[in-house]
Image (spheres, rainbow, N blue to C red):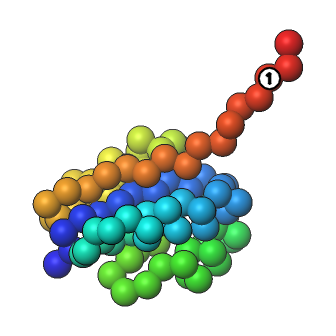
Amino acid sequence: MNSYSVIIAAHHRAHLLERAVRSVRNQAVPGLQIIIVSDADAPAVRQLARTLLTGDDLYIERFGEPGPALSRNLVSPRRNPALFCFWMMMTPCLKTI
């Protein structure tokens, strides 16, 4: 059983997914599982997840209302590790005034 699970919500964000997974993998934590949850039909995210995930990692596609909180809540009650965290992939917002 994994000691830690990291949930990454990936709504059409294939361009950020590799960096997020690499960042999680760079943590010096044994027993780490990565769970990617996509809340949309996103072939680029699906293909990248197949490439990046290994072993006990999971890729989940859910349908319905989009949103990172719903993705997190779908997965978190099902997890048994001692600790799980929700990894946010943020895109900077630049606004010209």
> Residue at horizontal 77%, vertical 29%?
94
Q: Is residue 15 left or right of residue 50?
A: right
Q: Is residue 20 visible?
A: yes
Residue most extreme to the front = 28
Q: Position of residue 79 (x, y in %)?
A: 22, 62
In the image, residue 5 above or below residue 57: above
**Which quarter of the picture shows residue 76?**
bottom left
- Quarter holding the N terminus is bottom left
Q: What residue is drawn where x is 44% and y is 68%?
A: 26
Give me the residue at 43% from left, 51% from top.
87
Q: Hey, which quadrant is residue 51 in on the image?
A: bottom right
Which residue shows up at 63% across the image and 75% down it? 48
Count of labels in the image: 1
Would residue 55 appear left or right of 77 to someone viewing this image? right
Residue 63 position in % (x across, y down): 52, 56
**Where residue 67 appears, x then y in whole percent?**
51, 42
Q: Is residue 68 above or below residue 33?
A: above
Residue 53 spot, x, y in % from top left: 48, 79
Farthest-out residue, bottom: 55
User: Is any atom of residue 38 visible in this view?
Assistant: no
Q: Crowding at label 1, few (<14), some or many (≥20) Cα neighbours within 10 Å?
A: few
Q: Residue furthest top?
A: 97
Residue 49 location, quadrant:
bottom right
User: Where does label 1 land, which residue?
Assistant: 95
Secondary structure under tag 1 reads: loop
Amino acid at circle 1 = Lys
Which quarter of the rendering shows the C terminus? top right
